[in-house]
Amino acid sequence: MYLQASIRMLSVFFAFTTLIARAQDAEIFKPDSIKKTIEAVKINTTLNVDGRLNEAEWIKAPNSPRFIQVEPLQGEAPNYETDVKVLFNRQYLYVGIFSHDSLGKKALRAIDFKRDFDFRQHDLVNLSFDGFNDQRNAMVFATNPFGVQRDLLAFDDIYYDTDWDGLWRVRSSRTDSGWVAEIAIPWQTLRYAKSADTLQHWGFNVFRNRRLSNEISAFSPYPRAFTASRMDYAGLLTNLQPPPPKPNIRFQPYVLTSYDHYKGFEASVKPEDTQFKIGGDLKWAINSNSVLDLTTNTDFAQADADRQVNNVTRFSVFFPERRQFFLENASLFGVGIAQSTDGSGGSMRIQPFFSRTIGLDNQGNPIPIDAGGRFVHRSLKHNYGAILMRQRELGESPATNFFVGRFSENFGKQNRIGGLLTVKNQPDRTNFVSTLDGFFRLGESHSLNTMFTHSSSTNGGQQGFSGFAQYFYSTNKTKIWWTQSLVSKNFNPEMGFVSRTDVVGTTPGINWYYRGKLVPFKKIIRAFEPGFLPEFYHQASTGKLIERQLWLFPLWINFQNGGYLGYAINPTFQRLTEVFEPLGIAIDAGEYHYLRQQLWYSTDPSKVISLTGQTDWGTYFDGRLFSTNFTLQFAPSPHFSLAWRFNRNQFKSVGATETSATIDLYGLEGRFALNPRLQLIGFYQQNAENDAKNYNIRLAWEYSPLSYVYLVLNRRGFNGLNQIRQIEEHAIMKLSYLKQF
C-alpha cells in the first residue's frame, strides 16, 4: 500500500515538475560560446603588495571588460563598476581590483576580521581559477575591504572544501571613490596542468558583492540560481606563462604545553596534569593533481569548541567538523545527503564517513591521535584518495586503526560514479562500511544524486544497509526536489553519521522565487519565496507511518538588504514506538497529532546591530511547546563584535507526568581584532538542562603566513551522573611554524 501511494505521489509530482520545467527552462541561459577574456601581463619586477596599485606596472596593465549584474537584475549593467588587472612574474600571480563606489568609505560593510568570513555580511571580491580548463573545478580566493582572507576549493559547484587555507597575500586600501585589493598568489599555491605550450589560458571568473545595496556583479555572468564556481560559465585569463608545476613541501611543526585540572571525576582521572607535546604536519604536493598529508602526535588545541544544542526533534544532532587536518579535501570523502541551508532536500542526513568519529569520543572529548596520513589525487577523469589514522588507547577506549578509501570516475559534462570503503579496527572487532554512489548532471537545471551503503562487523554484529536517490531541479524561479532514503534497523556505520535508523524517508518539496510586477515596495522587498516541504517517514521494518510533517511556507519575504521574514505552519503526526525523552521529559509511546507554527526572521546581517532567529509555538505531542532561538549581534567596527545567543524551550503539560518546564540555553561570543592576523576570540555558554557552564577564550596571532601562536583557556562544568558536579579546566599555549620548500 505504501509503495503504491508513493508511486502515485511521485507521478503527480514529476508531472507537475515537467510543466514547471517547460515554462522556466529559458531562464537558465547557456554558457557563452565565445568567452570574455582578461589578458595577464608579464613583468620582471617584484611588486610591493600594499593595496594601492600605484606602481607603473599596474598603471600600464589593461582593465577587464565591464561586469554584468547577477543580483538583483540579472543581465543588467551594474550600478557600481569594478576593474580587474592581472600581472605575473616567475614567483607570483598578481591580481589588482578596484571596486568603484560613489559613497566611498561610507558604503563599506565588514563586521569582523574572521578568516573565511560570512559573505552575507561583507563587501567582497571573489576570484575563481580553473587551472586545468576542465570547467569542473576551481580554486577560490576572496577578500573584503580590510584585506581579510576567504578561500576554498570547489568541485562541480556541488562539493566544497570551505576550510582549505592556501598560502597567499592580500592588502587593501579604502578611498573616497571605492576600495582596492592587491593580491599576490604564489605559483606553488595554484594548481594547473603541465603543458608544453608557451602560453596558457585558464578558466577565470570574478564576482563582486556590494553589500550596502546587495548587488552582485560578475566579470563573466552566470544565472543567479547558480554560483560563480560553475566554471562552465567562467571567462578566460589569457597570456599566462606559469613555471612548470613542481613538487613542493609544506612542513608545519608545533610545540605545545598545557595545564589540565579536573574536579568531580572518577578516581582514575588525575586531578591535575601538565603536558608537553611536540608534533606536526607535512604536506607534499607531489604534482598538480596529487597531495600527500602526514601528521604525527596530531593536536587540535586551536580548533573552535562545539556549541551546545538543545534538541527537541527525533533526529540526532549533527556537530560539524572543526579540526583543520580533517577539513582539507573533505569533499572527496564527503559522500551522502544532508539538508541544504534553504531547507531543501529533507531533514535526513546519511554520511558513511564522518571524520568526527576519529580522535573524539561521543561527548566530543579529544582522544590522542598518534599518527596518520591522507593521500588525494584529482584529475579530469579520476579522483581517488585514502586516509589512515592511528588513535591511541585512552581509558576504556582501546587503540583503534581507521581507514577510508575513495575512488570516483568523472564522465560527461559533470557526471560522476564512485565508491567508498571505511574500516574501523579494534582489538576485538572490525567494522566495515562499503558504499557505491553517483552524481549525474542531467541538464543545466537538473541533477540526480544516488548512494547505496552496506555495513557489517566481525564480532557477530548484524549487517545493515542504507541508500537514497535525490533529484533537484533549479531555475531562477523554482527549486524542486524529491529525496527518497532508506536506513535499515541494523545499519551501523561506526565511522559515519546517520540521523535515524529503521526508517524510509520520502521528502519532496518546492520553493518558488517570485520577483514580478506584483511585488510591492520593491525598494524594500526583493522577492516572495513561498514553499511546500512535506516529509514522510515510515518504519522500515514494519512499513508503518511513524512521522509526517507538512511544512507549508505561505509567506517568505527576502528583503533588498539581505534580511528575510518567513512564516510556516506544520501539521505533524508522530507514532512513537518507544518512550521519547526530549530534554529529559518522558513522552509515552503512542500516536500523536499536533500543529506547530513558526516565524523566521533576520534583519540586515551586515549592519552594526542585527537580529536573526526563529520562534515556533503550538501543540507538541500531548502538550504545548513554545520555542525561540535568536542571535543579537553588535558589530560597531570590524575590530570588535559581540553576539548574544538565546534559546528557550518552554514545555506545558507534556508527557506522562504532564511536565511543565522552561529550559534556557544562552551564550555570549566576542571577537576583538587589531588586524586580520591578531585576534582575541571568546564565548561563554550556559545550559539549564544539566546546569552546564562553559567558556572558551583563544588568542590567535598569525605572526607569519599560516604560522601561529595560540593561547587557549577552556572551562567546562556540568552535572554528571548522580548530579555530581564535574569541572574540567585547560590552559594551553601552542606555537606552530610553516615552512614551504
Image (cartoon, rainbow, N blue to C red):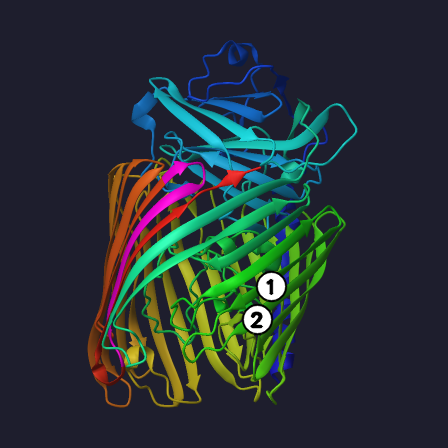
Image position, residue 599 (x, y; %): 32, 59
User: Do residues under tags 1 and 2 come within 8 Å of each other at their CB atoms?
Assistant: yes
Q: Does residue 190 sit above or below 580 in this rendering?
A: above
Q: Is residue 347 visible?
A: no
Q: Does the magenta run of residues contain 718? A: yes
- The amino acid marked with disc number 1 is Leu
Image position, residue 376 (x, y; %): 65, 53
Element under disc 1:
strand
Q: Which residue is mark 1?
A: 388
Residue at x 53%, y 24% (from the top left corner): 95
Q: For mark 1, does the 10 Å Cα neighbourhood hold few (<14), some (14 to 19), or many (20 or more) residues?
A: some
Image position, residue 338 (x, y; %): 52, 63
Quarter of the picture holding the N terminus: bottom right
Q: Which residues are magenta?
A: 702-720
Main SS class of the magenta portion in the image: strand
Q: Does the magenta run of residues contain 607? A: no
Residue at x 44%, y 60% (from the top left corner): 320
- Single out the residue that lies furthest toward the right: 196
State which quadrant residue 122 falls in: top left
Residue at x 64%, y 54% (from the top left corner): 375
Q: CA distance from mark 1 to mark 2?
A: 7 Å
Query: Which of these two is toward me, 191 or 314?
Result: 191
Element under disc 2:
strand
Q: Which residue is mark 2?
A: 401
Query: Which of these two is toward me, 450 or 309?
Result: 309
Q: For mark 2, does the 10 Å Cα neighbourhood hold few (<14), some (14 to 19), or many (20 or more) residues?
A: some
